[in-house]
Each structure stands twice: as structure tokens, then as C-alpha cells.
Image (spheres, rainbow, N blue to C red):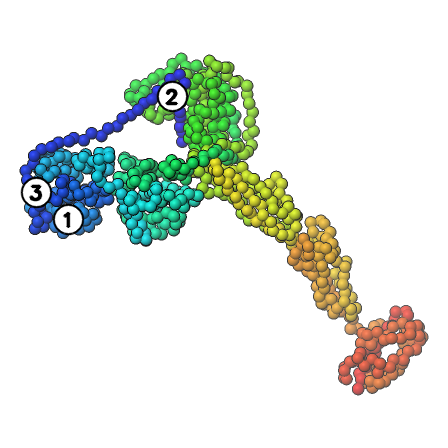
Amino acid sequence: MKKETTRLLLIVSLIVLFVTVFTSHVSYAADTYKIMSGEKVLYQSDAPGKYNAIVFGRPGCADYFLEYISNSKYLTDSNLQFMYVDVDDNDEATVTEYAKNYSSKITYYYGGDNVNCFMFSNLRTANNIDMDALPILCFVDENRNVVKSTNYDELMDVSLIDKDIEEVLGYTGSDTTVSKGYSMTSVDESTIYTTPQSPKKLNVIVFGRPECMNTQGTLTNISNSDWVSDANVGFVYADIDGNNKDTVKAFAKDYSSYITFCYGNNNSLAWSMSGASGTVSLPFVVYVDENGNTVESTTGYQSANSIYSVICDTLGYEKVTDNFTVQTKGSILSDEARTMLEMVNDFRTGNEAWYWNSDNSTKTFCSGLEELTYDYELERIAIERAKELSVYYSHTRPDGTSCFSAYPEGEYWACGENIAYGYTSADWVFTAWREDDDDYSGQGHRRNMLNDNFNAVGFACFEVSGIKFWVQEFGNKEKFSDVNTTSVSYPTSEQLYEVLVSDEVVSITEVIAPQNLTIDVWEEKEFDTSLSFKSGYSPYVTLYLPTSVNVKDTSVIKLKDNVLSGLKPGNTQISLSARISGSKDYKKDITVTVSPVSIEKSVISISNSVYDYTGKEIKPDVSVSLNGAVLKVGEDYSVSYKNNIKAGTATITVSGIGNYAGDKSISFTIKAESKNTPVVTKDNKTTFSIKNKKTIKKTAKIKVKDKDKIKKITLNGKTVKIKKNKTSVTIKLKSYKKTLKKKGKWNKLVVTDVNGNTKSIKFKTK
């Protein structure tokens, strides 16, 4: 896309184009006419209105006319009777079916015996009407005179019908006797009026269709505004496509309940109330005051600020339109932009230095043009403008001022600007600006580059979100000061640059903010605190807002240079705020949850993985480390044991506490006691008073002797109390009733001497 504009301070020219539509006005005395309608013959003298407005046409041809008249404010005027007269000899059933599409206040006549065709032919001949340009509208007065007849086709502006009516009836200015009121039907079946029924001082009516994105955007802007609930203003959506109640009601769910939604075909009403003509963009937005007057009408997408501006002007509200700042993130590519200097100068001094004149048949050849000097002041201006284009693509700056306000006041007596975006190279955009194949109307950029009033130039390329914005700034300052030829360097890395905007120009309706997040204690994470938005004027570019940041609890998190660190488990908020209009701030609280570190990430160590069975709990010492740091038991974790007595697999579980959470387990093995009888060395002198594997009484005594002295005796794994280092010990079984096994079960008695030799016997009790 490319645009150009030029300003000469020495020459100011203004071209005003006046477009006038002329229609002929004829009057003649006609014969009495008659029109067939079933069994009824209507004669001129029977006409109920002072004037008859007769539409001659055929089904499929007169549709647009009849639709407009059906919604016309003049439909019920007592001085006028509307008729449709079929010219194709269609029968009564055909015309009756056709009439169902339009107002019942129009009288419909079919053409029995071609009577209508003959009358139409007479009118056509008398008034020099082109028969092929149906439909025809004829106004016949009470004296049988055709006072006006006009041929239209479907491509003409049907709103001219109202102007013809006003001319015929003499309704001009304050003399009009026609009500300015309108009515539409809402989805809740109430009737929407302007004066005198409307209680609102101003009604804002959006005529559109549900699938139209401009209509959707305009309704969204109204719905999200602070003034949608203003008691003095009524907001109405009026469907222009004839959608039924259910369709419009479903559409209404996406928007504010303060907007009244009306269904049906309000297309003709949109044209008549807005006064629009020709090809327009939806929606029609019509502002009607408490007296029923249309005070303003616009077409196309409307920002919240533009709508509110009309409301303020109409109702006398004080309008706040202060400027505010946004940010664009991009790279200044000066080296690439400067390569265009040779291209432009070769173009100015070469054989292709020409442009079409306005007649598109003759050319102006620009011979003798001088090369342009590169002006680093103009380059600075071009860079500033390129940044601004990423926010608002127009020769109007984002703050609402002219592009030439970027120039230092009083330094340049001639200025010019070319802009473009989307071109990926200097060669490509320069070729586009040459406009070799365009006619005069499309060669504005070319004429700027060939303008002999310019002697200096500066270029810029600003890349943002992968899109390059290009600017050429032309000037001539030789009468005021010298051209700045001192080279300037700019950073090529992507950076944030501030741009001043006006809320009259840039409307921010949706802000993109960071979302709630969770981090671990000690974790560091990149956290972009910027608030961003998409501009409707540069929809592919992400723009940013200078943001104020506040952390509610700095003991939970630390935020520095967009790096977020978790300090301890807990929750807190990061509050962000930014100015999004001259008088309005956007605020957002982001909840940050800091979670304890999972102990599952730790390394658990014990001294051995296998331990001998002892008959008691085995609790190996535990060491826990995480990311190279040794954790402290009782402060960072606790330890528990399971299945750590009997032979088999035992479990150690480490549970996080404090800044740590979760559990992690490891296991170790308890080796089973050997079932083999201990090997007795030849030096073992241990003897028992009973034989091995005998059955004895529970009250028996067992005498043990060992010349090497007895160190330890166990009965079924339980230590027997003895005096150590004795050579003879007597064991009274009645003292060990709880240790003895049940009758018929083997008991085991083990003796260990001071040399470590062991000897055992088994016995049963009876």
C-alpha cells in the first residue's frame, strides 16, 4: 500500500468539484385516465389524494422502488396516494402475490386488457420517457396534469424519490408538513420512535447487517464504552436485510443490553435518514435529535471516540481528548532505506523522468532536474513518521495532526511525503512508487520524486512484526538554512519506541495482558509486564502501552528487569496499569502462585544398600541434596522408615517441608539370618545337659558348660541374662515362658563363647 502528499508553502491551490443532478420538470393536460383493478376502474376524479404518485413497472424491476416507498416517511402523507401499475398485462393473482412484499398502503393495479399499458404509453410519449428505463414514477395532480415524471433504473439513488415528492408537494425547509418521525420494530415487539414518542434527547441508530465486520466493530465499541448507559442517549441497531426476529435476537446477545435491536427490512429507512447516496460502506450511523432531525450521519466503521464526539457536540458535553502514549517495537533499517538515494537520483536525471498530465493523453517531461541531497534532518523526520505508520497508517499523524507537523517549523519552504508498507525491499517499494503503468490519478508518488521544488530527501524503513514501513520525506530549505549532511547512526536491534496518539484517532477497545501463572521457589522465569493491543489501522502489528508495575508482596516474589523469581511458597498479585485514552486507564491484576520445590527432584543417599538382620529397627543415616545444595533435615525435609526390622526390602521416605513439598522414597535390603547350624571349631568345648532335638518339660533346667568361658546365650533370638565369662550356666526355662514357643514347636538355644565360636541345640516343650 502506498500514499503520497505534497505541500508547497508558496503555492496553495484548492480544487472544488461541484456535482449537480438535473431532472426535467414538465407539465401538460392529460386525458382522463383509468386503471383496471379487478372489477374496479379507478378514474382520475376518484383519486383519494391531492396527488397520485404512480409507479409503472413490472415484478423484479420495480422492487427497489416499492421497498423504498414502503418505508418512506411520506407513505402516510394525506396529500399523496401511492400506486403501483403493472405494465406487462400480469393477471390479478400475480400482482396480488407481488404486492405481499410491500406496504399495504400502496394500491396495486394489474393490467387487464392492456389498459394500463396504453395509458403508460401515452404518458411516455407525451413526456419523452425512455420506455426501457423502468420503473417510471409519474406525479399526477388533482387537475389531471402530469406535473412530474422521471425514469429511474435500479442503479440510481432511490432517495431522490423523496426530493421529487418534496418538490411536487412544495415541502421546503420549515414549510414541510411531513412528520420527521420514524418507527421500527424491536426484537421484543415494541415500537421504536423518535419525536414525539422518544424520551431520548439523541438517538444513535446503527443500520447494518449481522455478518458485516464493520457493523460488529461499531456495536462492540458502543457496548464497551462508558457512555452506553447515558440516560440522554438511545442506541438502536436496525437490520437492513429483512432478517427475522430470532436471527436479530441471536445477534444481539453479543452486545450491550442498552442497545435496542430491531429486525425487519430497514434498508430504505437507512438511505432516507442518512441522506447517503452512491456506493457506501456499512454501517450507516445516523444521529437523530429530540426534534426528529438528523444532526449527523456517517458510513463505515466508527470508533468509540468518533461516536462520542458527535454525542458531545450534540448534547453539549465537555469532551476530553488528551493525547497519550503507545509503544511500537521494531528495528530502524537506515542502511537499507538509504540505498534508494541512487535510485531516486537516477530516476530524476534519466530518460524516464516524466508523468502523465491530467488528460492522460499528454506527458510532462522533467528535463534538467538536479539530484537530491541526502538530508539527515529529513531522515530523522522519516524515521519518526515510519514509527507512527506502524500505529496509524495515514498521512495524518496518530496525534491527529498533519504529517508536515513533523517538520521543524519555518525551516522548509517545500515539503512532500511518500509512504508505503508491506514491501520487503527498497528496490520493490521504489518500483511501486514509480507508478510507471498508472495514469495521472495514480502517479502522485512519481510526481513527488520528480518535483523540481525539492532539493533534499531523507528515507526510512522501520520493520515491526515482520512488516516494513517505508517513508520518503522531501524538502527544500535553501532559503532558510543549510541541508544537514552529517551522518547519524541508529540502533538496528528491535527496541520499543514511543508514539504520541490522540484518542480521536486511535481507539483501544481490547488490551492483551499477561495471564495468571505459577512458578516454584527459587525458580526464575521471563515475565513480560507489557500491555499490548492490535490497532485497527495496522491490524498485523502488535503495539504496546507504557505500563506501571506494582508487586503486592515482595516477600513472595521478586520482579526485576522482566525476570520473575519465587522467594517462598504463597500467592501475590502483580498490578499493571496503563493509559488507554486521554482520560481512561486500563488496570489488570495478575495472580502469581509460588509453589514449593518438589522433593522428587532431589538425590537421596545412604551409606549401604544391604544390612544384616538384627531383630531391631535399622535406620540408616540419610543425606539429601538438590541442584548441588545439601538440604537440612528438620528444616527442608523429614525422614520416615517402613518394613525396616524383618528381613526383606525396607523403605526410606523423604518428605519435603518448608520450601519443599512432595515425597521421594528409596529402599535398602535387610539380609535374612542364616538357617545353617553354626560351624563348631575343634576348640569348642560347649556341652548341654540335654540332647539335641529332644522334648523336655517347660519347667526343666538346661545346664551349659564351656571351658573357653561363655560370652552370650540366646533363646529363640532373645538374649538370656547370664553372668559373662562363666564356664558353666544353668538356664531355668520357667523364667522364659514368654520366649518359649508353643507346645510342639522347635525352640533354639545358641551359645557363643569368648572366642566367637557358637553351638546350638533345638528342643520342644511338653
Q: Amino acid at mark 3?
A: Ser
Q: Amino acid at mark 1?
A: Val
Secondary structure of residue under mark 3: helix
Q: Which mark is residue 447?
A: 2
Which numbered disc, 2 or 1, marks the residue closer to the eye? 1
- Local crowd at mark 1 within 10 Å, few (<14), some, or many (≥20)? many
Q: Are marks 2 and 3 in contact (CB under 8 Å)?
A: no
Q: Where does label 3 land, which residue?
A: 45
Residues under labels 3 and 1: Cα distance?
Answer: 24 Å
Is 231 located above or below residue 423 in the figure? below
Displayed quadrant of residue 86 = top left
Q: Is residue 593 left or right of residue 312?
A: right
Displayed quadrant of residue 138 = top left
From the top left corner, tell me how far across and down residue 314 is, in percent: 36, 37
Secondary structure of residue under mark 1: helix
Q: Is residue 506 left or right of residue 57?
A: right
Displayed quadrant of residue 234 = top left
Q: Quadrant of the N terminus?
A: top left
Q: Quadrant of the C terminus?
A: bottom right
- Seen at 14% across and 35% down, the residue is 149
- Seen at 69% across and 49% down, the residue is 627
User: Which of disc 3 and disc 2 is earlier in sequence?
Assistant: 3
From the top left corner, tell me how far across and down residue 636 is, in percent: 71, 55
Count of marks, rendered view: 3
From the top left corner, tell me how far across and down residue 121 is, in percent: 9, 38
Q: Is residue 62 left or right of residue 536?
A: left
Is 32 located above or below residue 644 in the figure? above
Q: Where does label 1 land, which residue?
A: 95
Viewer-proximal residue among 588 and 725: 588
Q: Which mark is residue 504?
A: none
